[in-house]
Amino acid sequence: KHQYQLLPVTGVKKDFTNGNNKKILLQVSSLPNDVPISSLSNDDLSEEDCENLRQKVENGLVEKPTVADLEEKVKSLHEDITKHWIARELSILRHRIDLANEKGRRAELYEFRKRRDLLQSEEEQARMLSEVPNVVADVIDINPEDGEPDANPRKVITVEESKQNKVTL
């Protein structure tokens, strides 16, 4: 069905075996080999993917993350993920600039160049790197009559990337 799996990251390694090119490797539970960060999918997760992960947590197949665990992972991965995203976005923009230039689409060309120049600026990159996502834990409501969680208990831990975007686990 899917060519990917949602698995918890247990560690991060930096590999310098290729000279000056550092390679970020993720240690993932239940996988024998480390996974290069560049091989991660940039696709959005569906609600079904999130539900499958919740089910794995409920069944004990995947350890339930704590807020402290998520905060630590966010801090350790944010810089590498952001730098990877910037490099990928600049590559896409180069392609779009070339295409807009070939097709004579001046308005698009202007917008793509403006976006490229912004992403290439040290100030913008520093701003993006300084915006480390906040981890916010939502609490399960306890039913006061019986002291049990509500009929539909679901603890949601969100990683707030910006005011518009949230990643939910």
Image (tube, grey):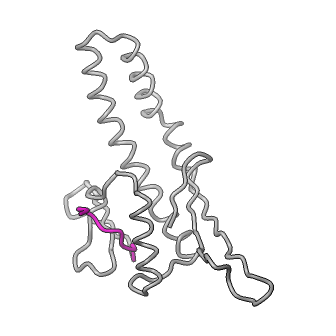
In the displayed structure, does residue 145 sit left or right of residue 9?
right
User: Which image quarter holds the N terminus?
Assistant: bottom left
Residue drawn at x 27%, y 64% as measured from the top left: 4
Residue drawn at x 23%, y 62% as measured from the top left: 3
Residue 68 location (% of width, % of height)? 58, 75
Asked if the stretch drawn in magenta spans residue 88, the answer is: no
Residue 40 location (% of width, % of height)? 30, 58
Residue 50 location (% of width, % of height)? 44, 65
Compared with 150, 4 (above or below) is: above
Count up the numbered dots.
Answer: 0
Q: Residue furthest left?
A: 18
Bounds of the magenta span? Answer: 1-10
The quarter holding residue 71 reads bottom right
Q: Residue furthest right?
A: 144
Secondary structure mostly seen in magenta is loop
The foreground one among 5 and 34 is 5
The foreground one among 30 and 72 is 30
Residue drawn at x 40%, y 57% as measured from the top left: 45
Residue 132 location (% of width, % of height)? 56, 55
In the displayed structure, does residue 100 sit left or right of residue 135?
left
Asked if the stretch drawn in magenta spans residue 2, the answer is: yes
Q: Residue furthest bottom?
A: 146
Compared with 101, 159 (above or below) is: below
Residue drawn at x 39%, y 22% as measured from the top left: 113
